[in-house]
Amino acid sequence: MRRRFCAAALGMALAPALPIARAAPRRHAVLTLAGPGAVVSYPLMHMAATGALAEHADRLRFRLWQTPDQLRTLLVNGELDFSAAPCTLPALLYNRGMPVRLLNISVWGILWLVSRDPAVRTFENLAGRELVVPFQRDLPAVLLDTLLEAQAARGLGPVTLRRTRDGQDAIALMLNGQAAQALLVEPMASLLLWRAGQTVGAPALHRGQSLEQAWRGAFPAQPSLPQAGVMAAARVADDAELCSAVNQAYAASARWCVEHPAECAALVRDHLPHLPLPAIETAIRGTRLESRSAEAARPELEALYRLLADRYPQAIGGSLPPAGFYAP
C-alpha cells in the first residue's frame, strides 16, 4: 500500500505541470475617468473615445472638473474612478486619510510666461514688474511662490503678483492692455496668444520661459519638475491589475497625442468646444507630455514633496506619502 502511494506521489511530481488558471479580471459596467481641461487630461479623453480597457470595463466615460474642490467632492461621493490631477493633490488627500494612489506623472512643463514686452523672456526679467496669475492655493501658486522666493534670495527685485479669479480673467486683462505679463497653464497660454493674433487692436504678445525652465535654473539639484498625472480613487486603488492596465493605456494614449497633435486636438474639442483647434494643438505641441509610473518618478516627486514640506507643508498634508502611495 505504502509502495503504491509513493509511486503515485512520484508520478505526480514528474508529471508536466498543468497551467494555473488565471482569475478573470474584475469587470466594471462603467469606469469614470476625470480631469481638468488641461493637457494632462487629453490622454484620458482619448482612452474614453477609443474604448481602452475593454478587458476591464464595458464602457469608459470622461468627466470634466473645474476646481480641486470639485474633484474632492467627486471622490468623496464615489463618482469617479481615475482622475488627472496636480501631483500635490493625491498626496494631500492621502495624508488626510483618503487612501488614493498616484499612478503616474505625465506632465513636466505646462506653465508659461506670456508678455507684451519682448524683453521679458524669463522669470528673472520680471524683477520690479507686475505678473498676473490666476492661481490661489493650488500647485502652480506654490511653485511660483517658491521660485520667486529663490530669486529674491539671490538679490533679484520683487515681483508684484496680481491675482485673478481664473484664466479667462487673466486673458481679458492681457487682451485689453490692462496687464503686461501673465503666467498661464496650457491650453490657456496658447488660447491667449491665439486670441491676440485674431483680435484687431490687441497688443502683440510673446511666449516667454516656461516655469519648468526657470525651475531648472533655480533648483539645479531637481532639474525635472513633476506637475500632474493620474490618480486612482480609493475604491479602485487596491486593484493592482486595473491600475496597471490604466497606466499602460494612458501611456499609449499620451504617445498618440504627442504623435498626432492635430487629431488629438479635434478629439479634445468634443469636450472643450469653446477652445479653438489651433490653440489646443499648440498647447499639445508645447507641453512635455511623457508618462512615467509614479514609482519610476518617485525620486523627482519626493524631491518636490520635501521642498514643499519645508516651505508649504499644507500643500501635501504635512509629510511625504509612504512607499505604497506610488504605483509601479
Image: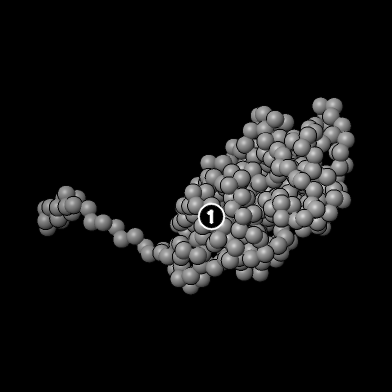
Q: Is residue 89 left or right of residue 106?
A: right
Residue at 31%, 61% in the rendered image? 21
Estimate the x, y position of residue 173 in percent, counting from the top left. 83, 53
Estimate the x, y position of residue 202 in percent, counting from the top left. 79, 52
Colour pattern: one colour
Q: Is residue 85 left or right of residue 296?
A: right
| Image quadrant in which you'd find residue 277 | bottom right
Determine the residue located farthest toward the bottom in the rendered image. 29
Is residue 81 something one can see in this rendering? no
In the image, 71 versus 235, the foreground residue is 71
Q: Which residue is mark 1?
A: 262
Say which amino acid is labelled 1. Ala
* Mark 1 Cα-neighbour bin, 10 Å: few <14, some 14–19, many ≥20: some
Quadrant (top left, top right, bottom left, bottom right) of the N terminus: bottom left
Residue at 80%, 39% in the rendered image? 117
Determine the residue located farthest toward the top in the rendered image. 154
In the image, 159 versus 24, the foreground residue is 159
Find numbered disc 1 in the image and state the secondary structure of the residue it sits on.
helix
In the image, 226 versus 102, the foreground residue is 226
Q: Is residue 129 left or right of residue 38?
A: right
